Image: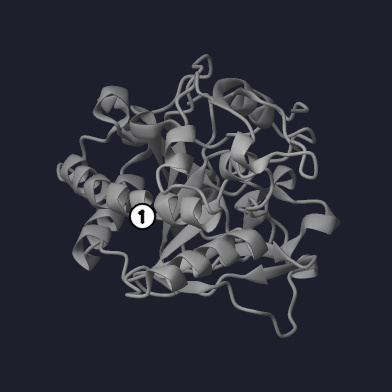
Amino acid sequence: MEVQRVQAVANSLSFATDTIPAEFVRPQQEQPAITTFRGPVPEIPTIDLCDPDQENLVRSIANASKEWGIFQVVNHGIPTDVISKLQAVGREFFQLPQEEKEVYARSSSSQSIEGYGSKLQKDLDGKKSWVDHLFHKIWPQTCINYQFWPKNPPSYREANEVYAKYMREVAAKLFESLSLGLELERHVLKEAAGGEEIEYLLKINYYPPCPRPDLTLGVVAHTDLSAITILVPNHVPGLQVLKDEHWIDAKYIPNALIIHIGDQIEILSNGIYKGVLHRTTVDKEKARMSWPVFLEPPTECVVGPLPQLVNEANPPKYKVKKFKDYAYCKLNKLPQ
């Protein structure tokens, strides 16, 4: 195999040695043991999506998006068994023999990020993150490339299709609430982000057990380039967000979804809503997994601050550009 996967690295290490390869050791200013805040911290907001008071729901989502850029939602309408099946088939995929997973590998020459892999963003210092992943689109139908959907386990396709159906309803409610929170008509933000052509990109993150979780990160600090990210975690904690200059742990709430405001909503809102800076830590004994879905504009969609939110007192804070150009700059660490 050309690329050594992190899962294979983890399996080859003796946990008695208490070391990891040097390329996984983060600089001191990034190491979680040193930088995680241990004092009393505020909790990431939790919002009931079935709140009968619609004005309160809109206000709660808008406030969380302005002050945090992240919130958790409960009573979101996705049945527990639908989420459990999504998680089960993802776990089964990562338990397959390595050569079977490699069938779905992203080729190094591909322009797309779909497929099985271990590296996403360019790292200027040559460092690696303690994670393997599988990317594939789950909606709209015209964008789906089934060559990246595992055929094993056999129920993988159905579990993902059912999840996608329910998740689109959650996404619609979030877009509407975010629009109303800016005192815009409910359809405005979704339309500006691509409307019915918004692409739903699923990523399964697999963070193997790590002998030195104090030294490494599963995913380094970043904001998402999406409009919105809707994430299913597993029971192993690891998501951290930067709040008031402190890295704080996200509390695990069973059956909740974690919602990240991404760069495109920050841009469209001209900075009223904030993309959340977040990172992922890993565990010494347990594999951590997560299932984010990135709601992204189609590649040719032009995104910039909404004209309704720009005036002399509030000039545009961001450039107007095609989503594909924004994504290219972000993934290659180039200035926007």
Q: Quadrant of the C terminus?
A: top right
Number of marks in the rendered image: 1
Horizontal side of 224 relative to 47 (left or right) equals right
295 in relation to 166, above or below:
above
- For label 1, the SS is helix
Neighbourhood count class around disc 1 (C-alpha, 10 Å): few under 14, some 14–19, many 20 upward: some
Q: Which of the colour schemes (rainbow, by chain, secondary structure, one colour) is used? A: one colour
Image coords of residue 293 (percent x, y): 41, 46
Residue nearest the viewer, comparing 61 with 281: 61
Q: Amino acid at mark 1?
A: Lys
Nearest the eye: 197 or 78? 197
Instruction: Please give the name of the residue rendered at 43% of the width and 49% of the height, measured from the top-left corner.
Output: 175
Q: Which residue is mark 1?
A: 173
The residue lying toward the viewer, choosing from 141 and 316, is 316
Residue 308 in picture, x, y percent from top left: 60, 39
Residue 284 is situated, as x and y percent measured from the top left of the image, at 57, 67
Left-right relation of 183 to 30? left
